[in-house]
Each structure stands twice: as C-alpha cells, then as structure tokens.
Image (spheres, rainbow, N blue to C red):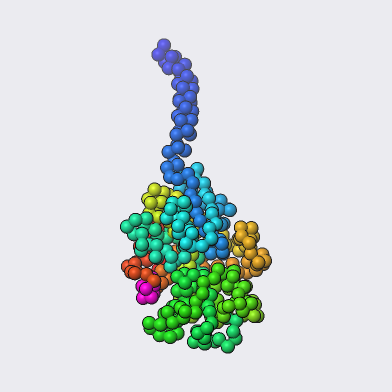
Amino acid sequence: MLHSSGRSSRPALRQLARVLGLAASLTLATVLPAQAQTEQSQVTLAIQYGYAYLPVTLADKLGFFREQAKAAGQPDTQFEIKRISGSPAINDALISGNIDIGGYGLPGTLVAWQKTQKSLDIRALCALVAGDNALFVNDPSIKSLKDFKADQKIAVSSPTGQQALLLQMAAERTFGPGQAHRLDNLMVALPHPDATTSLLNKAGITGYIGPNPYSYLLAKDAKVTKLFDFSKELDLRMTSGVLTTTGKFVKRNPKLSAAVVAAIGQAQDFIKAEPRKAAELFLQSEPSSLSLDQVEEMLRGVSGEWSVQPIGVMTLATFMVGSSALKEAPQRWQQVFFDPVATGEGN
C-alpha cells in the first residue's frame, strides 16, 4: 500500500512544485526590478554646441546611456540632454542642482574643484576630447606673436578660458619667464562664430584662437593665415572638454556615474569606427555650415583626440598657479577626477 501510494503521489508533488516554482518566479519578477533600480530615475546633462560634445550627443541618440545604465542594474533611468549657452550658465545650473552633469572646460573644472572641495566637491567625471586650437591672423605681416602691434586684437572665447590660457602659455614661451600676461591687453572675448566672421571681414580683430570646427573652416580660407597649432607651438596636447559633476551625485549614484563614463567611451569608439555616421548625427543635432563630407573629414582628422582619460591636467594646473589663475594646484591629477577615470592612466 505504501509503495503504491508513493507512486500515485509523485505527479501531484511534481505539479505542486511547478505551481510553487511559477509563483516564486512571478514574485521575483515583480520584486527584482524595484530592487534593481536603486539610483536616480532621471539624469540631466547640460552641454554647449560644438564637436567637443559629440560623444554626449551620440551616447544619447544611439542609446548608449540607457544601454550602460541597464547593464549597471539601473534599467529605468532616463537621460535628458540640455543645450545651455556658455560655461557660466552651465556652472550655475550644476551648483543650483538643476542639472546633474555639465560640460566644462578643463580650466573651469580646476577652478571649480579648488573652490568646492569642502562643499559641493565638483570634479570631472571623464574627459571628452583633447581638442587642439589654432591661432589665425588676417594680417600677412604677422609671422609670430612678436609681430602683433599694441592696437591689434586677438579674439578668445573668454578671458579666463582655455584659449586665453593657451595664448598666455605661448606668450611665456615666446617672451620668456614671467611674461605670460604680455599679450593680455590684446585679448577680446567673442563667441567663436562672431570671432570667425570678424576675422574674415577684418572687423575689429587681427587674430583669433579657435578649436574645430572653426579652425577646420579657417584653414581652408585664403583670407587668413594659420600662425600655428598650439599643440605644436607648446609641444603639448591637453584635454579641452570634460563632463563635470558633484560629489553628492557620484555618492548617490555610483553605478550611473560609471555607466555615463562607459557610454561616453562607447560613443568615442563609435566616432573613430564610424566617422561618417557620426558626422550625420552631428549635423542632425546642431546647426553647422559644414557639409557632411567636411564633418566626416574633420572627424577623421581628430580621431586621436577622443578619450575618457585626461591629458595635460597637471601641466595646465601648474601654469594656472604661476599665472595667478589658480591658487593651488592639485598634488595629483586624480584629485580632480572621480572614479573610475581617476584609477586610469591620465596625466
């Protein structure tokens, strides 16, 4: 009797096990997603216009942000990209908490890091591009920085921005130690599009320091002459664009912070591998006078500039201290960056 009863009860037991298994899987299906999404459900990034921010644009348009967030166990996070004109406005938005991550220049990041170490703890999350700048002139008699006259003007994006600092570094190399500010009185602040137009029309400026895509266009225009590329003049490559955030955001969202860095790296690899497709997406995302072929050519020419790892941080910081733009330099470049980039091979 016991043997017979045991055989007859096995199907019932198997059915009960299947029912319990199904119930358990349904319970996990409803509980796990809620447990997995432990960080912010929306991340807002603010950037300006320009090719330096192309990795952010591509990471958004190609779904890399969402893909990396999902891989990090944050499947419900949505990403919003805002276009904000001017670094001061992005800085204000980050400080006020209206954005989570902002596109900065490296000099601005160093200043923000120094001023907020005991408060917001603003640091860079990753590098975007080590973009070069070039000095163009519309006066053929100018062959070097020594040829600029006292009444001639050189357009830079900001008197405290990267173009201005590059000019000061070049002035010190040209005129000697302690001469970094030798040409400061020639500098005038103009947005890149206005500076390009003014240079070509000889409307108030004689020189202009610009990054791509403006330098790409000017290099092909017979009305102006390129005096030099700063990477060659200074024998230095330097990160120009970075994504910057606060210690509060990183502490609360370590997985999403790493996911953003991974997505930017993925987008940078895409630019290198698919420059024409990247060019198409660039032209879809912002106004430009460049053709598709021109943007593709430009991106092919700067393929070595893309990396989440920074370069030239300590060189720039040391110079900024010497020129009084920064009170104190970090002891190590890693102090200015959050993990995981801070554990990488930048400099």
Percent coordinates x, y for residue 172 in the rendering: 42, 81
Q: Residue furthest top?
A: 1
Residue 343 visible in the picture: no
Q: Position of residue 123 (x, y in %)?
A: 40, 59
> At x 40% / y 55%, what residue is drawn?
246
Magenta span of residues: 317-324
Location of the C terminus by quadrant is bottom left
Q: Tell me which secondary structure the magenta stretch mostly adopts.
A: helix
The residue lying at 51 percent from left, 62 percent from top is 86
Where's residue 218, x and y in %? 61, 75
Residue 101 lies in the magenta stretch? no
- Residue sitting at x 53%, y 75%: 155
Q: Is residue 184 above or below residue 123?
A: below
**In this view of the protein, can residue 182 be seen by the observer?**
yes
Tell me the quadrant of the picture where the N terminus can be found. Answer: top left
> Residue 274: which quarter of the image?
bottom right
Q: Give the number of callouts.
A: 0
- The image shows residue 153 at horizontal and vertical percentages of 53, 79
Please report the residue visible at 41 percent of the width from the left and 51 percent of the height from the top: 249
